[in-house]
């Protein structure tokens, strides 16, 4: 099902053979360290590349060409994974089998141009397009405020992880944009292309040998890999608290906890299960108690930050119910420390996690992302291995993991 | 019977049960997930109707269809419907929109048991004064969450601007005031009217055995609430006139947001024309004139008048239709003028032949891609079914579409009298 190939020390291919879909996906992932001085350039670069190439000089021409290729789509993603910055380009095409003409080779060529053959003038990108994308990124950064839940979560992250790379914002900073121009960005591009480890995941139905040879020919480039430091666990810290006011109706509460459990520890999956039972879905303690029993909220969930050994719980509530909500939320954690976990909660969380793993097979993009993100960890696991681990999780061990949990952050976004 | 599309290699088994409930099963070999959605042809717009049981005309409180959806999960033994799904790790949910209420789950394990349970709990209404009261706090929080959501407010205000009497101008979840008036009796009235098997449809998709699944369904459905004929729904009289040309609100946002909407005229809604064909025309028009890849979108983006591509779509049901164009801009007046200018251009000169061909190819590709997402297919199929449309016919209609069809549709929908503008401004 999955085959791995090395083009060279720093460029890998993974081939996922799957003939049940009508779509094929090729994703090219670039790995960088999450650094304050680079984060904004990383957030800008792929969009500039996506807007103009040697053969397709404007974004309109590029978009029109892709439409002509039966809705072929090349999308860009810039995301924070632990303390790494991952930039990816994803090409999705309808499999030639269902179309009146063959378009896949042409689509891959466009992907190649976007990554390796940008439109350059006087040793720089085209100023107009860099300026446009700078404006777009600026608006994107400013619009964080539009989604109050996301805004609150971002502010809470900054508060809790102050001083750690994890607190760096995924899409960069407004003030950095002033110092970036078409020349400095092109210089950065040259450095980026020659120092970022590359992983290409090919998923779907192809003439396997043909496509792998084709991709190998495109991506056989020399890379002097940038150093990407290992993440450090979040250390126990003093309690941090912050409140912000805005003209809003519903307040957003975010609480943070540390456990000192690292993704390499034996009890890591006990920790994962603890967080699921706590607030991973409709089977969870937070959903059934804070929402259903006490009607305090509509949305509430718990998320873990795996390389940090931390948990964040987020909820939307009536401003005057803050203390009541905090008390109830912490009670769920105290209950778990006492081992008060019902069979329904325990089995529900485990089964849901296994179900989520099994559903990965039904989406090429999800499968590609899963295998890529596993591959950059120190001990990658397959879907089947994770399912086995989850099946064998014991309640006592979940309780042990819960006992390590300590509350250390409160962020509250409330109305004026 | 089977509905087929040979080019896509897809087929759907369809059967009407003896109690008039419609069942669809779409086999998808090799997929891990099996998905089922059980829906009622009943949404937030159905506020007034004649009860088929008492023959009385009833007007219910706003937001009741959505409230009912929440309460559906209560079981008579005081447990929650989610509990049974959790036993298998199945992922369950529900949603309500203006015209439909759907209860769904996806399972990689225990599908048969989960399907039985789905049919069971949706056909077991259990509303008490206490459990109705408890839900009010939860739904009030949901409403408030949407009150702070600028995309929702922008869109919803455009509906308020377009519709004077039609329930489109009423929020799906109602208001905090309206939901506090809801009683269990009212919920039962709605349930007994709209949750009759004759008003419901079930769509199953995945690697399933059709015969086994049909047997399971037939042994699980109950016949209660069945009555002859269709529900008489009462809709207030709505003329072509819009309620107001401009509507504005201020929220905590970074950049002003706008939504331009055109309300479809009664004469066009009533024309004898396959609605699916009209929807495809509108979809192509949105793509041609406004969306990514259009000359207009490119011009606005290159001048930093917008920062992400224009969004545009057409929504319709039996008694309404509207097309929207939206984005964010620091200069809404200028963008609005450029959009109107482009529309007038298209009305006068028609669409370009090359562009039309290209967009047809794009729509064909994206239609094919839809078949890789089992949830999307099921939900889309059912919502179209309730409008008497068959999703599988999209392919043929798309291929046969002519440039004249597009140009004629452009002239019909973009009547300036039918236009409204909704704006969300940043708070100062």
Image (cartoon, coloured by chain):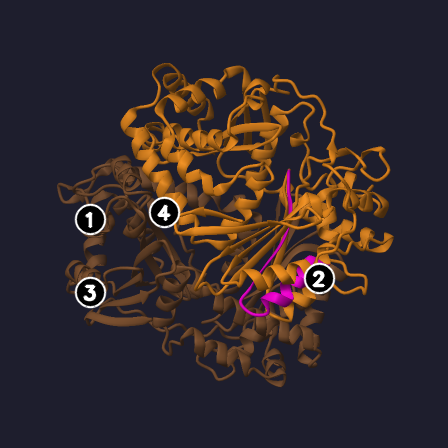
The reply to whether the magenta stretch includes residue B113 is yes
Report if residue A38 is visible in the image: no
Q: Which residue is mark 1?
A: A113
Q: Which residues are magenta?
A: B99-120
- Closer to viewer: mark 1 or mark 2: 2
Q: How far is disc 1 from disc 4 in space, using C-alphas?
A: 32 Å
Q: How far is disc 1 from disc 3 in space, using C-alphas?
A: 22 Å
Q: Which residue is mark 4?
A: B7
**Residue A209, numbered circle:** 3
Can you give x and y, in whole percent of width and height, for residue B150 in the image? 57, 39
**In the image, B101: left or right of A228?**
right
- N-terminal label among 1 and 3: 1
In the rendered image, the vertical position of residue A256 relative to residue B196, given as above or below: below
In the rendered image, the vertical position of residue A369 relative to residue B72, given as above or below: below
Do badges 1 and 2 share one subunit?
A: no
Q: Colour of chain A?
A: brown
Residue under mark 3: which chain is it in?
A
Do badges 3 and 2 share one subunit?
A: no
Q: Colour of chain B?
A: orange
């Amino acid at each position: 099902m999955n085959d791995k190939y090395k083009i060279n020390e720093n460029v890998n291919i993974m081939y996922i053979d799957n003939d049940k879909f009508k779509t094929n996906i090729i994703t090219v992932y670039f790995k960088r360290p999450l650094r304050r001085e680079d984060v904004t350039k990383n957030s800008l670069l792929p969009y500039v590349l996506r807007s103009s190439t040697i053969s397709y000089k404007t974004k309109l021409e590029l978009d029109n060409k892709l439409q002509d290729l039966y809705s072929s789509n090349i999308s860009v993603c810039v995301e924070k994974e632990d303390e790494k910055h991952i930039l990816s380009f994803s090409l999705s095409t309808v499999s030639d089998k269902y179309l009146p003409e063959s378009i896949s080779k042409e689509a891959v060529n466009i992907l190649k141009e976007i990554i390796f053959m940008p439109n350059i003038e006087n040793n720089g990108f085209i100023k107009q397009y860099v300026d446009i994308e700078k404006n777009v990124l600026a608006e994107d950064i400013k619009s964080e405020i539009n989604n109050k839940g996301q805004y609150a979560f971002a502010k809470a992250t900054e508060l809790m992880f102050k001083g750690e790379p994890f607190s760096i914002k995924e899409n960069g900073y407004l003030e950095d944009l002033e110092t970036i121009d078409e020349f400095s960005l092109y210089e950065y591009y040259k450095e980026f292309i020659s120092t970022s480890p590359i992983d290409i995941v090919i998923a779907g139905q192809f003439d396997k040998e043909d496509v792998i040879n084709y991709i190998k020919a495109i991506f056989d480039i020399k890379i002097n890999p940038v150093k990407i430091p290992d993440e450090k666990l979040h250390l126990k810290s003093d309690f941090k608290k912050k409140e912000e006011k805005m003209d809003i109706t519903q307040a957003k509460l975010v609480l943070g906890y540390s456990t000192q459990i690292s993704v390499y520890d034996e009890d890591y999956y006990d920790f994962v299960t603890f967080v699921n039972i706590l607030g991973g879905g409709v089977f969870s303690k937070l959903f059934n108690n804070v929402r259903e029993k006490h009607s305090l909220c509509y949305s509430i969930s718990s998320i873990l930050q795996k390389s940090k050994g931390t948990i964040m719980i987020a909820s939307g509530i009536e401003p005057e119910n803050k203390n009541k909500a905090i008390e109830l939320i912490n009670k769920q954690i105290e209950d778990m420390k006492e081992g008060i976990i019902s069979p329904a909660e325990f089995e529900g969380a485990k089964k849901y996690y296994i179900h989520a793993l099994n559903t990965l097979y039904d989406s090429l993009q999800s499968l590609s992302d899963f295998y890529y993100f596993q591959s950059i960890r120190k001990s990658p696991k397959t879907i089947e291995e994770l399912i086995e681990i989850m099946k064998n999780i014991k309640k006592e061990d979940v309780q042990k993991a819960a006992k390590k949990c300590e509350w250390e952050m409160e962020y509250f976004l409330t109305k004026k | 019977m089977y509905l087929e599309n040979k080019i896509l290699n897809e087929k759907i088994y369809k059967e009407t049960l003896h109690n008039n409930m419609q069942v669809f099963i779409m086999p998808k070999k090799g997929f891990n997930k099996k998905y089922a959605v059980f829906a009622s042809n009943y949404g937030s717009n159905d506020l007034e109707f004649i009860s088929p049981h008492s023959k009385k005309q009833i007007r219910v409180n706003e937001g009741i269809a959505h409230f009912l959806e929440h309460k559906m999960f209560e079981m008579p033994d005081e447990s929650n419907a989610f509990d049974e799904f959790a036993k298998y790790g199945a992922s369950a949910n529900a949603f309500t929109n203006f015209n439909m209420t759907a209860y769904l789950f996806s399972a990689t394990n225990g599908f048969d048991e989960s399907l039985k349970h789905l049919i069971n709990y949706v056909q077991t209404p259990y509303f008490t004064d206490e459990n109705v009261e408890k839900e009010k706090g939860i739904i009030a929080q949901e409403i408030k969450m949407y009150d702070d959501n600028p995309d929702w407010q922008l869109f919803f205000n455009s509906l308020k601007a377009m519709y004077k009497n039609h329930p489109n101008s009423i929020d799906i979840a109602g208001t905090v005031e309206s939901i506090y008036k809801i009683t269990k009796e009212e919920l039962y009235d709605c349930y007994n009217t709209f949750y009759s098997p004759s008003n419901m449809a079930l769509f199953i998709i995945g690697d399933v055995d059709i015969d086994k699944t049909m047997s399971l369904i037939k042994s699980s459905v109950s016949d209660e609430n069945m009555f002859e004929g269709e529900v008489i729904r009462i809709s207030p009289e709505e003329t072509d006139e819009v309620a107001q040309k401009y509507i504005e609100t201020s929220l905590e946002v970074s950049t002003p947001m706008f939504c331009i909407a055109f309300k479809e005229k009664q004469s066009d809604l009533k024309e004898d024309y396959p609605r699916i064909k009209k929807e495809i025309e509108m979809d192509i028009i949105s793509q041609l004139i406004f969306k990514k890849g259009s000359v207009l979108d490119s011009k606005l983006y290159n001048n930093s008048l917008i920062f992400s591509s224009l969004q545009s779509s057409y929504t319709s049901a039996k008694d309404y239709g509207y097309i929207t164009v939206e984005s964010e801009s620091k200069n809404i007046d200028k963008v609005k003028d450029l959009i109107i200018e482009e529309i007038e251009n298209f009305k006068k000169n028609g669409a370009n032949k090359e562009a039309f061909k290209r967009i047809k190819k794009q729509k064909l590709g994206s239609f094919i891609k839809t078949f890789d997402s089992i949830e999307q297919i099921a939900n889309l199929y059912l919502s179209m079914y309730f409008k008497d449309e068959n999703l599988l016919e999209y392919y043929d209609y798309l291929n046969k579409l002519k440039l004249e069809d597009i140009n004629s549709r452009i002239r019909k929908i973009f009547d300036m009298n039918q236009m409204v503008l909704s704006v969300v401004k940043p708070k100062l």
